Amino acid sequence: MSNVRKDVHTAGIPVLCVSCEARHRGVCGALNPEQLLTLAKSSSIHRTAEGEVLVGDAQDVERYSNVLGGVVKLTKTLSDGRQQIVGLQFAPDFVGRPFKTESVLTAEAATEVDLCSFPRRVVEKMMADQPDLQRRLLDQTLKELDQARDWMVMLGRKTAAEKVASFLLMIARNIRPSTDPDAHSASFDLPLSRADIADFLGLTIETVSRQMTRLRTEHIIRIENNRHVIIEDFNRLVIRAGD
Amino acid sequence: MSNVRKDVHTAGIPVLCVSCEARHRGVCGALNPEQLLTLAKSSSIHRTAEGEVLVGDAQDVERYSNVLGGVVKLTKTLSDGRQQIVGLQFAPDFVGRPFKTESVLTAEAATEVDLCSFPRRVVEKMMADQPDLQRRLLDQTLKELDQARDWMVMLGRKTAAEKVASFLLMIARNIRPSTDPDAHSASFDLPLSRADIADFLGLTIETVSRQMTRLRTEHIIRIENNRHVIIEDFNRLVIRAGD
DNA sequence: CGTGCCCTTGACCGAAATCAAGGTGGGTGG
DNA sequence: CCACCCACCTTGATTTCGGTCAAGGGCACG
């Protein structure tokens, strides 16, 4: 009985996509089985190592991708080397700038990342005769715009302490989206190094480190092995974030 | 002869829209004469005074608008009153957040503003059966996302001097889009007060003022009546912006 | 058992914020 | 028409937060 239902639901769906999150919450949700099949034919799943550059600045973009796992950071760099992370992408986000063949930023694997990627032309072809797909992309873009604007407030108006607290909350929400927002504790591995966090928050690594230490000494968080964070007092962390 | 051609081009186009910039560079460019007519029937042009709130935070959005003239600022405010401008919109930009009935920011007239506005439902109806319109909105949203990310770099990594220089260049480009980028001088009225500029750059008004004074004493710009700026040395201003 | 990377901690410094006075110009009411 | 007011801007003095410089710890790796 449950077999029958499962057969109906997955009928004609490419093996590649059956258990893929992007088919539900991501852009692929806009496609019917036939279109999925077309896309799957020219798509490939692969794993990239931490630090690998997915799309370089001013480089032609020939492939679009869905993030299946891990975290991708989008960075911009000034001519003298100052860097700023302008976006973080988690599963099942879509990586790639539609309708522009040249990227104005660098997309880099912040952790080990699993991607499902497709040639640019196939995606754009589908977009032309599939309004739903365009709509999904619009939704994703609007979501990124909202995030970008929240970060602008953080970058322009928050103190170092507030920035670090806000960052930890943002990661906690994205890594474990299922977490009960009222929960008084949560734990996760930071997907970013201190240097990346600094580039994200517009701070130096020293300042990030000091603020983390401060949160630790005040028993708001605990830190294990530098990367694993346990939020001990969710409420006080929220207050610290200062919205 | 030229009359005939003009008649052909404007045949069936609502009077309201004939000379409207949004019909060419804005979202209305996606509509055919018939659709323009439908939209024009329920649209209205009006002028709002400086300081007027177009869309309040957490307020229902019942109307979308095109900016016909003037500048609209989008701001976010923290609970203790700290403010950050997260977007500036010039003609023929589209104001309004599609597919979300509640705004998460405040849209306010930074100058006197001319708007052409339509009921939300009419626009969303058209969007459903007009992929071109959705495409235009996607383009506008992507443009805003690109700008937001550039500003994130500015907010996170630039010094006060660089921020003010970057701001002046951005205004110069948007107020006089026809200006030759290689020109060595340009002049315009600032659409923002010092307080707004500070909220845009993540600085205080005193710091903005000091940086303007510095640019003035170094003969990179001249200032008349506090609001009128003449760029005397475009190249040095670009260098100051520090990209 | 080094070696190097990442992180932390401390001392000091400097850019921008804060605090505090004025200046200026446009609008209003006498 | 003038005088006053008020909003907006500039300038100066001082403080402070975060950056810079410097040293050292911990852990993984060869």
Image: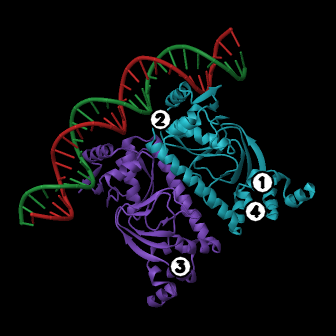
Chain colours: A cyan, B purple, C red, D green
Are discs 2 and 4 less than 8 Å apart at CB?
A: no
Cα separation, mark 2 vs mark 1, equals 42 Å
The one nearer the camera, A114 or A153, is A153
Q: Which residue is mark 2?
A: A160
**Sooner in the amino-acid sequence: mark 2 or mark 4:** 4
Which residue type does callout 1 highlight? Ser
Judge if badges 4 and 3 mark residues of a common chain. no
Letter of the chain that mark 2 sits on in the rendering: A
Q: How far is mark 2 from mark 4, CA to CA? A: 43 Å
- Tag 4: residue type? Leu
Q: In the image, what residue type sits under mark 2?
A: Ala
- Report how far apart the C-alphas of labels 4 and 3 lie in the structure: 31 Å
Quadrant of the rendered image containing residue A170: top right
How packed is label 3: few (under 14 Cα within 10 Å), some, or many (20 or more)?
many
Q: Earlier in the sequence, mark 2 or mark 1?
A: 1
Q: Which residue is mark 3?
A: B39
Q: Are marks 2 and 1 on the same chain?
A: yes
Q: Nearer the viewer, mark 3 or mark 1?
A: 3
Question: Could you tell me if residue B16 is visible in this image?
Answer: yes
Q: Are marks 2 and 3 in contact (CB under 8 Å)?
A: no
Residue beneath disc 4: A31
State the mark number for residue A43: 1
Residue in view at x 72 percent, y 65 percent? A126
Sequence order check, earlier mark of 4 and 1 = 4
Q: Which mark is residue A151?
A: none
Camera-side residue of A12 and A171: A171
